[in-house]
Structures are given as structure tokens and as C-alpha cells.
Amino acid sequence: MNQSQDEHYMRRALDLARQAEQLGEVPVGAVVVLNGKVIAAAGNRRETWQDPTAHAELIALREAAKRIDSWRLEEATLYVTLEPCIMCMGGIILSRIPRLVFGARDPRVGAVGSVFDLADDERFNHRVEVSEGVLAEECSEILSNFFRQLRQKKKAARMRSAKDE
């Protein structure tokens, strides 16, 4: 795909990240594209569903597999606003996604080069082509703003609590 197509689908993933944020979720969005069409899309739902596996990527992969009635997503591309974690990279590899496009790096738990690099690990029977940094600034900014606001809320709550004592 070309850069403008990648940006188009990443903007869709960013929209999903913003929707997740409105629900109090860490703002991450994912889109699965097959033959130029979005076949699945999701935002994080860990808090909403109280499910530690409800990352945007895994939800989108599940939806895509149901949509095409196959767990093998061998011709699809996954777009995600944040570098996938180990769990999500496991799902990506096992679903045979050939191409991953992500926006921002995750220096804490990223599994596509930041902390681990599972995309090109020779021990796996599947490799994933990676394009990174698509709309990276926007993807990073939405996360930074979310966590800044979360820290401010926690600080305000601690201050209120200390006042009440």
C-alpha cells in the first residue's frame, strides 16, 4: 500500500482510539483491512469489559476472523495506533497477518522493536512485515494527553483526600 492509504486507515484507527478514550479506555484503535476494505475495527475495551485481553488489536482480529470465517488472515493488513504488546503480537503472528502498520512506539511494553521484536523472530513460522511511524505524532499525542489527564485526576483526588483527613 502507499503512504496515503496507510494514513487513511490510520486515521480510522485514531477515530476508534478517540472513541475508546471517551469510554475511559487507554486510547488505542485498530483496523483490519482486506482487499482495500475495512473488515474489522475496534478500540480498547479492557476497562469496559473488565477483560485483560480486550486490547484493540485482539478484538479487531477476532472480528475479522469471524467476518471472513477463517482464523487465517493471510491477506489482511492490521493498522494500530500503538506498537503492539507481546500478547497482541502473539495474536498477529498466530492469525498470519502479513503486514502490520502502527503509529507510536511503546517504550514500556512494545513487542515490535521497543522492548522485544517478535515481528521478525526466526523462531516463529511466520514473519510480519512492519511499517511504523504512520501518523506517529498524532498517535503519540492522544496517548500522552490521556495519561497526563489521568495523572492530574489522580493528583487532585489525593489532594482532596489529604484535605479531608
Image (cartoon, grey):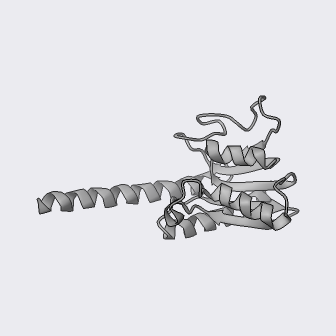
Q: Residue furthest left?
A: 165
What x and y, as percent, mark residue 96? 81, 47
Quarter of image, res 109: top right
Q: Quadrant of the N terminus?
A: bottom right
Q: Quadrant of the C terminus?
A: bottom left
What x and y, as percent, mark residue 136? 62, 51
Counting the numbered discs, the total is: 0
Quarter of image, res 57: bottom right
Q: Is residue 73 left or right of residue 45?
A: right
User: Residue at image x 66%, y 60%?
Assistant: 59
User: Residue at image x 50%, y 69%?
Assistant: 23
Q: Nearer the viewer, residue 18 or 51?
A: 51
What x and y, as percent, mark residue 155? 28, 56
Q: Nearer the viewer, residue 90 or 5?
A: 90
In the displayed structure, would residue 68 be above or below residue 87? Answer: below
Q: Nearer the viewer, residue 105 or 160?
A: 160
What x and y, as percent, mark residue 137? 58, 53
Q: Would you say residue 31 is visible in this rendering?
A: no
Q: Would you say residue 159 is visible in this rendering?
A: yes
In the displayed structure, would residue 22 be above or below residue 77? Answer: below
